[in-house]
Amino acid sequence: MTWYPKSINGKSVDASFHEFTSEDALADSEVAGVSFDSSPYLESPEYQVYEEPFHGGNSCDGCGVCDQCVTHRSAHRFWVRAEYLLWSLDGIDLPPLVTTSSAGTDPEDTGVIGQSGTTTLFGNSSVLDSMRSGMRVTIGWSDDHCGNGFELSGMGIFQDEETYQSNRGLLARPVFDTEAGVESSMLIAHPDFLTGSVNVQAESELASFEFNRRHVLSSMRGQRVDFLVGYRYGNLNELLRIDQSSEYTAAQGPIISGTTVDLFDQFEADNQFHGAQIGLQFQRCSGATTWDAHAKIAFGVNRGETTIDGQTTNFVPGGGSSTFAGGLLAQSTNIGTYDDSSFMVLPEIGLNLTTQVHRDMKLTIGYSLMVWSDAVRVDDAIDRNVSQFPPEAPTGSNQPAYELTTSSFIAHGLNIGAAFQF
């Protein structure tokens, strides 16, 4: 800032003096005393010094202690950031669920894992692990001139689904028969006596909400470190459903022609996390560009709920229909709702590059990584071992069975957005 004489030798100096008096003229004069004042032009709004706050708050520069710094108060106290997310979620690792065989395969060998000509049509792979869209909105406000304040953020990765449908002439669902101790299968379709179709649907979605207090730890020479403390909520949902329908075109023992069998298996895993969160955020400014990195970790309780359901409906021409609980992988031995609450950590790290494009607007691009340490997953709920086929009563090892298992879950991807200050 330039300072101008307000008076020289006790005489006031007006603005014209600053415009037309040279330094040489002053040098030739004897000056007994001078008092200074800032330029009147700097007092007008057009010449006010503007210091860009961090996230819309006011910042200090120099010693890092706000009440000892010379700061320029900014009019921006509130800010909002909207981001488009392009993230990838941990996929669901499925066992082989639908198989087929080459033409001419005997019914007892159709779709059996390990048999010559058997091909897996769906499963035996990871699904829902591709990039997908989401959104995050964050609002914040400062309650002092140093940038201390609060922020509220919510994000969601939109529900995605993967489906498979087939009505091939040879279709089966492979299982391991624990009674016989060998691989086996349930026929859906075979050209000798059975037509049918199968439909598989897998879904997943992720959401998170957090509320933090932001406190400035240090601010100097274009660098700033903030401490974050607050609350975090997370929600992770996964679902797998298998529907099949078959019709007998020829009698098979006591089963008459025209009999239909419809059944489904459904597995759902729901996680709800509540916890306290702490973190650090580092920011470095260089002109209109800002780099910032953050690391946060939440400690709390995750309530995991696994729901397994299944049903079979048989229709016999002239004999009516009958419905009973249980399908193939969801039978009376594992059907039910299973709850578990356990301690869990949910860390998140991120790196962002921000560019000031207008006094009140910034563009940002970055990367984020989130990890659930212990979550219930759909793939952990599936047991392809069976000791009986519907409508047989449970016997032997009473499988399929459910055993509580948790796994880690990772979500990560790119963030592209804009921030506005008010």
Image: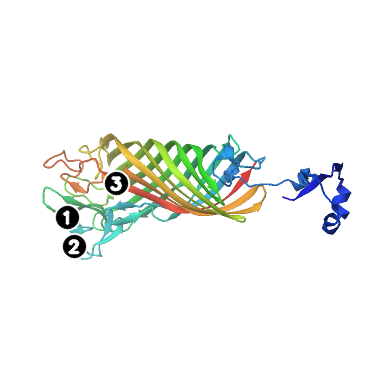
Q: In the rendered image, is residue 216 in sight?
A: yes
Is 371 on the left or on the right of 315, as rendered? right
Q: In the rendered image, is residue 258 in sight?
A: no
Tell me which amino acid carries mark 1: Glu
Q: Earlier in the sequence, mark 1 or mark 2?
A: 2
Q: Count all numbered tags in the image, as a single digit.
A: 3
User: 10 Å neighbourhood of mark 2: few (<14), some, or many (≥20)?
Assistant: some
**Secondary structure of residue under mark 2:** loop
Q: Nearer the viewer, mark 3 or mark 1?
A: 3
Q: Earlier in the sequence, mark 3 or mark 2?
A: 2
Is 275 on the left or on the right of 407, as rendered? right
- Residue that carries the numbered disc 3 in the rendered image: 407
**Secondary structure of residue under mark 3:** strand
- Residue that carries the numbered disc 1 in the rendered image: 183
Which residue is at the front of the view, 272 or 241?
272
Tell me which amino acid carries mark 3: Ser
- Report if the CB atoms under discs 3 and 1 are less than 8 Å apart: no
Identified at 35% across, 36% down, the residue is 300
**Secondary structure of residue under mark 1:** strand
Identified at 58% across, 45% down, the residue is 54
Q: Where does residue 62 sit, x and y in percent of width and height?
A: 57, 47
**Quadrant of image for the C terminus:** top right
Q: Where does residue 183 sit, x and y in percent of width and height?
A: 16, 55
Q: How much space separates mark 1 and mark 2, taking CA atoms?
A: 9 Å
Task: Name the quadrant containing residue 298.
Answer: top left
